[in-house]
Image (cartoon, rainbow, N blue to C red):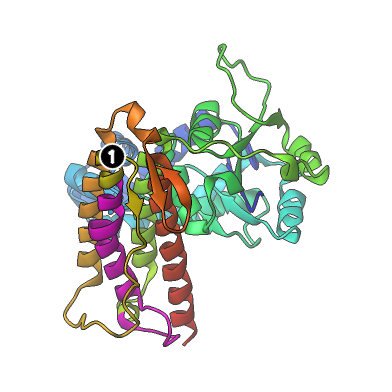
Amino acid sequence: MIKAVLLDMDDTLLLTDTDLYVRRYMGLLSQEAAQQFPDLKLTAQQIALAVRDSVRGSVANFDPTRSNLDIQGEIFHELTGIDAQTWYRFVDNFHQESHESLREIVRPIPNARPLIERLRQMGLAVVIATNPIFTRSAIYRRLAWAGVDDLDFAFVSSSENVHFTKPNAQFYEEILARVGVEADEAIMVGDGIGNDIIPARQVGMNTFWIDLGLPTDGTTVPSDAAGSLADFEAYVAAGSLNRLQPLPRTSEQLHARLMGNVGAIFGLADTMKPQFWNMRPDPNEWSPLEIAYHLRESERTVQRPRLQRIAAEDNPFISPPRTPFAPASLDLSGEDGYAILQEFWNERCKTLNFIYELPTEAWTRPARHSVFGPTTLLEMAHFTARHDHLHITQFCQTIGRCNET
């Protein structure tokens, strides 16, 4: 059952001559930056190259503990000497002022707003899944050009809040974890075969290809349907989302899924006020610090050892883990939430290395679970990912309640 619709932006919600837009954007940004920072004696071309290289650095990043903005800021500072925070204050101001002149080279798609409104009325989570190489201010300016910036989105990807980029499958898994849905509960709608359709399909999402009538160079488009945005709206109106069949879970999906989940929880932690770590709005629920602690300990003592046991033993019986600790029952004074999450990532790396080295035939190895009954190594590995989602959602809900207090 589809619960979330992920929408690309350029040439999906907003018609964009991408080459022209990027060329003019970079020219305008770099020229103004050269004037803004004259003491550094940087030419506009040097600044443009530094921006390009910083974006390339984020595309190449596979560290889920560092956002795209972190990566870009570090590389840009190394190349120009401009402090990352100073640079992004300049960039945000640019997006509010000079960037507006680029509006003339894009065109809104009339169906975008009524489609999103329809999806929201259906109770579906709507996500703007644009390539997160731009900051939130730039993305919201372009959403305004599309006439949809005031609508209620479940999530809008940007360089600040995502740790991967297209076409990496981890990008999609991180968004799914942030929204709280599984891959077979979401559909990706976009025009990019390589950026949108293929990687979304790889993680197990259904897809709708926005066909602009351009040559595909013989590339097979693995989408459930294709057409214009208006065609997708008709597709939705006809109830076609309810007839989509879930794609099978595979071992190839696991690395991206387990990495994307880590990016999601670091993204949530980055949005949280430091005092929230130890807050417990509901006395019967864990604090964010306790959730992080549980994820680390579960990875170390339950999730990975269980997979290792299935791989090593002949049809083992898997008993349920011990009942987790009660809220406020542990003394975590002096513990640092980010440090615990980093340790969780270190444990996850060990799990990733373990599954990476497994031979293909190992995924069908059987086990007997005290709750699920007959199972396999593959099924239990995907259960680890679902365990992540459970506590990422819990983390998100707790932060929300902390904000209300």
Nearest to the observer: residue 97 or residue 285: 285
> Relative to the observer, which residue lies in front, 4 or 355?
355
Indicate the amino acid at tag 1: Ala
In the image, the segment drawn in magenta is: 278-307
In the image, is residue 124 above or below residue 277? above
Look at 35% across and 76% down and name the residue there. 273
Above or below, comparing residue 222 to residue 250 in the picture: above
**In the image, residue 207 above or below residue 260:** above
**Magenta stretch containing residue 297, yes or no?**
yes
Q: Is residue 213 left or right of residue 76?
A: right
Q: Nearer the viewer, residue 151 or 166?
A: 166
Q: Judging from the image, what secondary structure is the residue with disc 1 in?
A: helix
Work out whether residue 357 can be spotted. Answer: yes
Specify the principal SS of the magenta part. helix
Q: Which residue is mark 1?
A: 311
Q: Position of residue 42 (x, y in %)?
A: 23, 41
In the displayed structure image, the side of residue 109 where residue 167 appears, left or right: left
Residue 37 visible at all: no
Which image quarter: residue 80? top left
Quadrant location of residue 26?
top left
So how many labels did they put on this image? 1
Residue 285: give x, y in percent of width and height.
Answer: 42, 80
> Residue at point 37% right, 78% down?
286
Q: Is residue 359 magenta?
A: no
